[in-house]
Amino acid sequence: MNPDKSTLLEMYRRMVRIREFELASMDLFKRGQVKGAVHPYIGQEASGVGVCMALRRDDLIAGTHRSHGHNIAKGADTARMMAEILGKVTGYCKGRGGSMHIAAFDTGSLGALAVVGSGIPLAVGAALAFQMRGEDRVAVPFTGEAGSNTGNWHEGLNMAAVWNLPVVFVLENNHYGVSTNIKDAVKVDDLSVRAQAYGIPGERVDGFDVLDVYDAATRAVERARRGEGPTLLVTEAYRFEGHYAGEPEVYRNRQEVDQYRQFDPIPRFREYLLKENKATDAELDAIDTEIKQEIARAIEFARSSPEPEPATAMDYVYA
Amino acid sequence: MNPDKSTLLEMYRRMVRIREFELASMDLFKRGQVKGAVHPYIGQEASGVGVCMALRRDDLIAGTHRSHGHNIAKGADTARMMAEILGKVTGYCKGRGGSMHIAAFDTGSLGALAVVGSGIPLAVGAALAFQMRGEDRVAVPFTGEAGSNTGNWHEGLNMAAVWNLPVVFVLENNHYGVSTNIKDAVKVDDLSVRAQAYGIPGERVDGFDVLDVYDAATRAVERARRGEGPTLLVTEAYRFEGHYAGEPEVYRNRQEVDQYRQFDPIPRFREYLLKENKATDAELDAIDTEIKQEIARAIEFARSSPEPEPATAMDYVYA
Amino acid sequence: MAATERDAVSLGGAAPVMSPDLIMQVAPGTPAREMSYQEAIREALREEMTRDASVFVMGEDVGKHGGAFGVTRTLFDQFGGARVRNTPISENTIVGAATGAALVGMRPVIEIMFVDFSGLAMDQICTQAAKLRFMTGGQCQVPWVLRMPQGGGAGKSTAAQHSQSLETWFAHIPGLKVVLPSTPYDAKGLLKAAIRDNNPVIFLEHKFLYSFRGLVPDQDYVLPIGKCDVKRVGTDVTIVASGYMVWHAMLAAQMLEREGVSVEVIDVRAISPLDRETIGASARKTGRVVLVAEAVRDYGPTGEWAMAVTEQAFDYLRAPVVRVTGRNSPVPFANSIEDGVWPRTDDVLQAVRQVMAY
Amino acid sequence: MAATERDAVSLGGAAPVMSPDLIMQVAPGTPAREMSYQEAIREALREEMTRDASVFVMGEDVGKHGGAFGVTRTLFDQFGGARVRNTPISENTIVGAATGAALVGMRPVIEIMFVDFSGLAMDQICTQAAKLRFMTGGQCQVPWVLRMPQGGGAGKSTAAQHSQSLETWFAHIPGLKVVLPSTPYDAKGLLKAAIRDNNPVIFLEHKFLYSFRGLVPDQDYVLPIGKCDVKRVGTDVTIVASGYMVWHAMLAAQMLEREGVSVEVIDVRAISPLDRETIGASARKTGRVVLVAEAVRDYGPTGEWAMAVTEQAFDYLRAPVVRVTGRNSPVPFANSIEDGVWPRTDDVLQAVRQVMAY
Ligand SMILES: Cc1ncc(C[n+]2csc(CCOP(=O)(O)OP(=O)(O)O)c2C)c(N)n1
Ligand SMILES: Cc1ncc(C[n+]2csc(CCOP(=O)(O)OP(=O)(O)O)c2C)c(N)n1
Ligand SMILES: [Mg+2]
Ligand SMILES: [Mg+2]
C-alpha cells in the first residue's frame, strides 16, 4: 500500500479533526454545556481513521458509545455533530440522540449504539443485504476489546463467517472497559486469535500507527469486497482519557497513562510525514489551523442553533 | 486410564439404560402416552456416560432439551424420570417439568434448560461457588454443537476461563441442530479450536467410544479439580433419531443415518469388552435383561402414579 | 422443542378446534378459499415475497424444515436458500441482522421459534430496533416483521419454557407495533400489512390456531394495524380479547345468545398502537366489559385495556370490569395442573354472567 | 454511559432534590443517622455481607470503581475481589452465573449497570431464574438479588438507551419479586429483605434518588416485600405511586393540603407480588384514585394498579381513575423535548384536581 500525498494529508486532517473535536467536547462537558456523557476517542484516532480511509463513502460503519471518532473518520460533518451533542435540532439526529447515538447516514454511519456489542448484528445484517443484492459494499462494526466478551460479538462473527459476508470486524483494544483491564476480562493476550473460532482471518496491528491500520484494513476490505468473507482486525491502542469526560480513573495510575501517551498517534504520524518528505511543516500547520477554525465554527453553529420544538417531541416514534 | 471391571460394566449398564429408556419413551410418545415432546439421546450414549463416569456424585451437570441421557448417565433413577415424562407427581419435578426439564438434584443434575445455551451460565455460576468456598467439585454443562453459536456459550467459556473455574464444557456434536447441519451453521471443521479464543485447552474425541470420552473427560475433570481451570471437550457422534420423536427428517437421507448407525456405541463397546476379556456374554446379557426389567418397572411405576393434585397447581411458584 | 404442523394438529387434544362458522369475515359472493391460519400466513409470505424482492425470510430451520411449526414450508423450494434463510442459533443476532438489513432497504420477515426465546433478543428488539428511527432523528426506518408463535393450551404440555404469551413485553415499548391475529383472514391481511409497514412489527401467532380454518379472499388485501375489529355486534356486554381468546369470546357469545344476552366481541388485533376509541365506544354502549387474555394475570394486557375503558366510559359502566386471564404462574407440564392455567370458554361465560348479574 | 455518584449529583440539575422532611419514616427518639439512598444501599450490602459469608456482589466494574453509580464503592477494599467481583461485559451470563451460584447455596447480589441492558439478560432473568424452582418441582431455590438503576429525569440527558423504567417486564413474570424503593429507609430495609429472600428479587434503584437523603435507624431491620406502604394518610383522594414518583406524590399532597385536599399516598414498594388489599382499602375510603408511574404509559404498571382498584372498590369510586405516566415515546436527548417525558409534581397536582373536580 502506498497512499498518495493527498490521502496521507487527509489521514492527518481527520486525525487532527477528531482530536480537536474531542478536546472541544470534553471542554464543553466540563463547563456543563454538554449534558449526558462524552466518551473521548483521544489516543485512538489512528484506528478509526486508518480503517475508514480504507472505505468508500457507500460502505457502512456501525459505532459504539465512543463513536465521535468513527463518525468523523467516516466523513461526518463536525458542525452537525457538535450540534447533536449540544442537543440542537440542527444536529445529525435532530437532538434526539446526543453524544452516544450520533448517526450520519449520509456519510455511511449507521449509528452509534450505546449497548456494548449491539452494533455488530446491524453491520452483519447490512452486509447480508449487500451480498443478497450483489453490491460490492462492505460493513464495518467497531467494538472495544471488552465488547468482544459479549454474546453479540460471538454470534455476529459466526454468522458473518458462515455466510461469508463482507464485514470487517474492528476490535479496538484500548485496554479498558470502563475500569476493567482487559487482563481481568479475557485470558488470551492476542485477541485476534478469536478469529480462529470462526474460521476467518484475524490480524492484529499497531493502533497508534495510522498507516499500519490503513494497510491491514485495506486488505481486509478488499477481501470482503471480492466476496471472500469477513476479517477480524484488532487495533492495539490505549485510552488516554477517562472512560468518560470527568471519570475519576481510580483503577490506573498516571505513569501508565503517560507511558502510552508517548505513542500519541498524531505527533507520530506528523513526524513520519516530515521525515519521509511527504509534507512540510507549513502544510501540516495549515491543516492544524484549518481544523481549529472548523471546530470553532462548529461550536458556534451548534451554540446558535435552536433546540427541538417541544411540539415535535413525538416525531419519529413511528415511521 | 485403566478403568477396572466394575467401572467398565457400569459404563455398559448406563449406556444400555439410556438406550432402553429412550426406546421406551419414544414408544410411549408415539402411542400418545407422553405429551409434549421427547428428544432422544440414542446414538450419543457414549458421550454422556463417558463424561459422567468421570464425575463424582457431588459434581454437577447442567443439561439441555435432550437430557434424558445426561441424567441417567449421572445416576438418576429411571422410575422417577419416567414418572416425570408422564407428568406424574412421583416424578423428579413432581410433574411440573416433563421431558425437557428433568432435574435430579440428589444425583447432581442441576436441571435441563430447554432454551439452547441457557444451562451454561448456571454451570459457570455453580463452579464459581465451588471455587469461592474452596470445594474441589466440578461443574459440567452439556450443549449440542449448534448451541456453540449462542451468545451464552461464548460468554460462559470466557468467564470460566478468566476466572479459572472448575468447569468442563462438553459440546456434543451430533451434526444437527434440528434440521441444520453443522456445516451450515459454523465454518470451522473442528469445534475444539474454539477453546483457543478463551486461552483454555480444547480436545476432540470420538463420541461413539465411551472409553475415549471417559479418558479425556477424566483428564479435564482432574485438571479442573486441581484448580487449573476449564476445558472444552468436543464429543463427535451423531443423532440416530429425528430431532424429536416423530420428527419428519426432511433434511437428511437414510443412507447418511445408516452409515453412522454402524458406529453404534453400544455394540461397539460390547465387542470391546468381549474381545478384551473384560466381560462375558452372559454377564452382558444379564445386564441387558436387568435393564429391560428396570425400564418395565419404571413404566409401571410411572403409569400407576397419580398426576399432581389440581389444588397444588400454585406450589413452587415462590419459595 | 420444535414441533411441526402435523404435531401442532395432532397434539391439540384437549381444547376444541372451533368451527370456522363462529367467525365469518368474508362477505357472501366474494371469491374466497378455505384455508388454515398456517396456510394463510404462508400465503401472505409467498405473495409479498413475489411482489417485492426486498422481502425475505430468515430464522432457525425456516428452510426445508419449514420452521418450528411448518409455516414456511415450501417457501424454500420456491425462493431458494438466499431468501429463505436458515440461521445459526443466535436469536439476538437474527433480529439485529434483520434490523441492519432493514436499515439499508430490505424487508426481512424473521421467525423466532417460540416467543419464550425472545428473552435472548429483547435488546435488539426493544432497545435497538424499536428506538433507532427515533434516536437518529428520523434518518432511518426499520421495516421488519418478527414472527413468533406463542401461547399454549390444548393439552400440548410444552411446559414453562415453550408456552408463554409475552405480548406486553413488546407492547410496552414505543416504536414497536404488536399484532395478534385470531383468524386465517386476519392473519393474512395483517401479515401483509406488517410486511409493508415501515416500522418493526411483532407478529404473534397462536400455536393452537395454526390448524384453525376459515375463508380467505382470493384478491389481494391488507388490514389496518392499529384498529380493533368488532367481531360480533351486541348490546348488553362487551368482551375485549385478542388472539386465540377471541374464539372463546365468540363461542361464549353464541352460547349467551341463547340465554338472551347480546354480546359484542372486540378483537384487539393489534394491541399496540392500541385503538382505545373502539373499546371505549363499545363500553359506553354496553356498560359492561369483560377482558380476556391468555397471558398471566399480573401486568398482562388487560390492565391497559381496563384503563381505556375507565378513561373513556367510566360514567357508563354498570359493573366493574372483569377479566379472565392466564393463571399467575409458570406453565406446568402435567395435564392435571396445566388444566386451568389458560382461560377456557367456561371462564368467559362465568365472567359475563358475573358482570350481567352485578 | 457509566456515571458515578458524583455525576449523579452534579448532573441532577433540572428536577428538585426534595427535602427529606417530606417523608419521615423513623419514629422520634429512635437512634438513627441521616444518609443518602445510595449510602443506605451500600450499608445494606455491607451488613449482609458481614452477616452471611454466602452473600457476594458481582457485576461490571463493581470493584474499585464502585459500579455504574458508585453504589458498591469501598466494598472492594473491605471484602476483596472474590466477594466484590468485576465481570466481563456479559449480562446474560452474569445473571445466569448468579443463578448457578444461588442453586448451590450462595446469595449473589448482582448489578446490571442500567436496566436498559437487561434486554440482554431477559432469558436468564425471566425464563430461567424465575421458573427454575417451579420447573423442578421445588427441588431448588434461586436466592439472588438483581440490582438495576433505572429511570431518568432531572435533565440528565442519558437518552433512549439509558433512561427507561422497565419494571413491568419483570412484574409480568411469576416467580420474580420486583421492588422499587423510594427512600433511604426503604432502600436499606428492602434490600436486606431481598437478600434474605429465597426468591430472585429485582431491585430497581432510581438513579435520581441516589443523592436523596433521609433517616435510617442504627439497628438492624428488614421491611416486608409484598406490602404497600402508606406514606401519608388522607381521606379525599388516593395517590398510588412507586420509586421516585412517590416524592412527586408527597410534594403534591403537601401542596394540596393547603388547598384543603387530604391526600393518601400509597407507596407500591414492591410492585410484585402486588399488595392489592392496601390499594383497595384506600380506594374504598377515598373514592378517588390517581396512579403515578414514570414508565411509558402503554402497558405500564398503572394498568395493573387500576385493575386492583376496579376489582376492589368499583362501587366506591366517585371519579374515574386517572393516571400520570411517562410520555409514550423513547427518551430523547435534548432538554427541550426531554422535558415533559417524565411526570412532574405539577402533573400529579393537575390529576388530583381533575379527580376532585369530577
Ligand atoms: C451491554 C452493556 N453493558 C454495559 C454497558 C456500560 N458500559 C459502557 S461502555 C463500557 C465499557 C466498554 O468497553 P470497551 O468495549 O472496551 O469499549 P471502550 O469504552 O473501551 O471504547 C461499559 C461496560 C453498556 N453500555 N452496555
Ligand atoms: C435459544 C433457542 N433457540 C431455539 C430453540 C429451538 N431448538 C430446540 S433444540 C434446537 C437445536 C439444538 O441443536 P444442538 O445444540 O446441536 O443440540 P441437539 O438438539 O442436536 O442435541 C433448537 C433450535 C431453543 N430451544 N432455544
Ligand atoms: Mg476498551
Ligand atoms: Mg446437535
Image (cartoon, coloured by chain):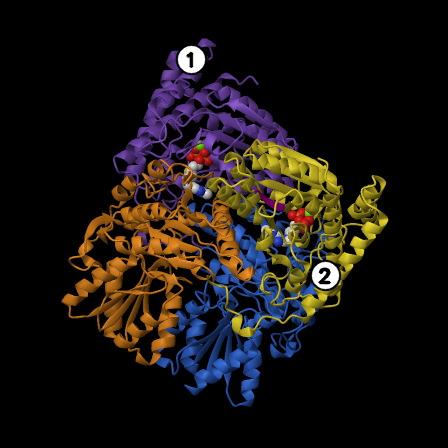
Chain colours: A yellow, B purple, C orange, D blue
Q: Which mark is residue A25?
A: 2
Q: Is residue A19 left or right of residue B275?
A: right
| Picture coordinates of residue B165, whole percent (x, y) | 62, 37
Which amino acid does the dot numbered 1 rest on? Glu
Of A15 and D324, nearer the camera is A15
Q: Residue at x 42, y 43 (%)?
A: C58
The answer to whether dots 1 and 2 both sit on one chain is no
Q: Residues within 10 Å of mark 1 (few under 14, many from 20)?
A: some
Chain for disc number 1 = B
- Count of numbered circles on the image: 2
Q: Is residue A49 above or below residue B248?
A: below
Disc number at residue A9? none
| Quadrant in which residue C176 is drawn | bottom left
> What segment is highlighted magenta in the picture?
A138-142
Residue D310 sits inside the magenta stretch: no
Q: Secondary structure at mark 1?
A: helix
Question: Can residue A188 be seen at all in this image of the molecule?
Answer: no
Quarter of the image with the N terminus of chain C is: top left
Residue B195 x/y as whole percent: 60, 32
Amino acid type assigned to the residue bearing label 2 in the image: Ser
- Front residue of B193/C327: it is B193
Which element type, helix, strand or loop, lies under badge 2?
helix
Q: Confirm whether residue D334 shows in the render.
A: yes
- Mark 1 vs mark 2, foreground winner is 2
The quarter of the rendered structure image containing the C terminus of chain C is: bottom left
Identify the residue shown where x is 64% and y is 79%. Answer: D21
Left or right of C263 in this view: D311: right
Task: Provide the major secondary structure of the magenta segment.
Answer: strand
The disc at residue B271 is: 1
